[in-house]
Amino acid sequence: MYRAIMVPLSDWRTDSRAVSAAVQLARRSAARLHIVHVRKGAWTRAAGRAEDQALDAAVGWAGDELNESVSFRMIRSELKGRRGGRTAEELTEYALANDIELTVMTRQRHSVERVLHGSVGERLLGLLDAPILFVPARPRQFRVTKCHVLVPLDGSGAAEIILPEAANLASFTGGSLTLLHVVSPDPHEVADASLARETHAQRYLRGVAERVGAGGIPVDTLTLAGDRVASVLHDAATAEHTDVIALATRPRTSHFEFITDSVTARVLSSLDTGLLVRQQVIEAGVNASELIGMAPRYCKL
């Protein structure tokens, strides 16, 4: 259950799907909904008045749906170059101050600006110690009841950090989980070794399913072969009628590393499902190579 949900609101016309999804989740979990708008750059009276009217409409609608269990905060952030100023930092400070447990955002369409400098959502992934639910902006109906959540796992403890969040979402929406493990094929490997790896992967997933399913959530497992995780995810999500893909993404040192070496970035750009993401956290004293390398030659997230 969530106690506090935040929606960073940029434009009511493009973010209405995120607000709608957040309202449904807040209603189901009796959470307080925080709608936060960061006003950036130069401001004019006419533009500000139109913006205020749109935001008031969004907050008013959400308040009516949730019996006024809605907070609203408008923050002013000065632009710094073309990178969107301190928007992500302002949202992070608000989230920490208000114990936000889930952020819901609309998946924005690609633009030259986002390709060059990244998005607010991408930056929030590296700043928040809480999951972000990216809601598809396309006409596809996003289902918040009986959510079927697909969870790709690579055999590492770091990837499993998303499991409690995925189970939570599936549980209080009355949905189910499918645990997916993608095994990278090796053309130089003998058949017996390949079969042994697949058997090991299936045993691993069954063990995880037993742990997660102990809470009463229906859990299926799926093992697939492929050397491109994003492509396998695309096919699996379509075949499994997935509503949300839940995954933990590895920390990246730069935006370009994120867009060129991230399953999350590929899923955001290609799939029409919801995406529940949080950044992997490796605790001090834990050998990162041991966590990420627990399953040799498994496709990494």
Image (tube, helix red, strand yellow):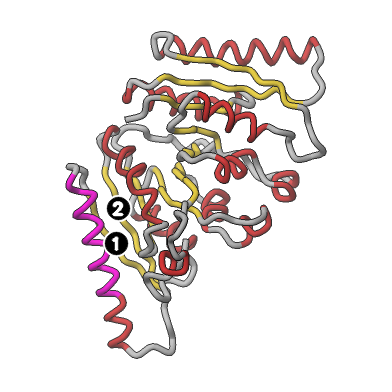
Q: In the rendered structure, which amino acid carries the disc numbered 2? A: Thr
Q: In the rendered structure, which amino acid carries the disc numbered 1? A: Leu
Report x, y in % for residue 220: 24, 54
Tell me the crowding category of disc 1: few under 14, some 14 to 19, or many 20 or more residues within 10 angstroms, Cα based: some
**Magenta region: which residues?**
198-214
User: Which SS type dominates the magenta stretch?
Assistant: helix
Work out whether 258 lies above or below 57. below
Q: Per the image, is 206 magenta?
A: yes
Q: Element under label 1?
A: strand
Tell me the crowding category of disc 2: few under 14, some 14 to 19, or many 20 or more residues within 10 angstroms, Cα based: many
Name the residue rendered at 41%, 56% in the picture.
159
Q: Element under label 2?
A: strand
Report x, y in % for residue 285: 45, 60
Q: Is residue 165 left or right of residue 82?
A: left
Separation of residues labelled 1 and 2 (CA atoms): 7 Å
Q: Is residue 75 left or right of residue 299?
A: right
> What quarter of the picture does the N terminus occupy?
top left
Q: Is residue 149 left or right of residue 51?
A: left
Q: Is residue 294 left or right of residue 200?
A: right
Q: Per the image, is 74 magenta?
A: no
Name the residue rendered at 35%, 44% in the picture.
166
Report x, y in % for residue 124: 58, 40
Name the residue rendered at 55%, 44% in the picture.
125
Work out whether 144 lies above or below 236. above
Which residue in the protein does label 2 denote? Answer: 178
Report x, y in % for residue 94: 56, 26
Which residue in the protein does label 1 denote? Answer: 222
In contact (CB < 8 Å): disc 1 and disc 2: yes
Say how many tags the image has.
2
Q: Nearer the viewer, residue 201 or 223?
A: 201
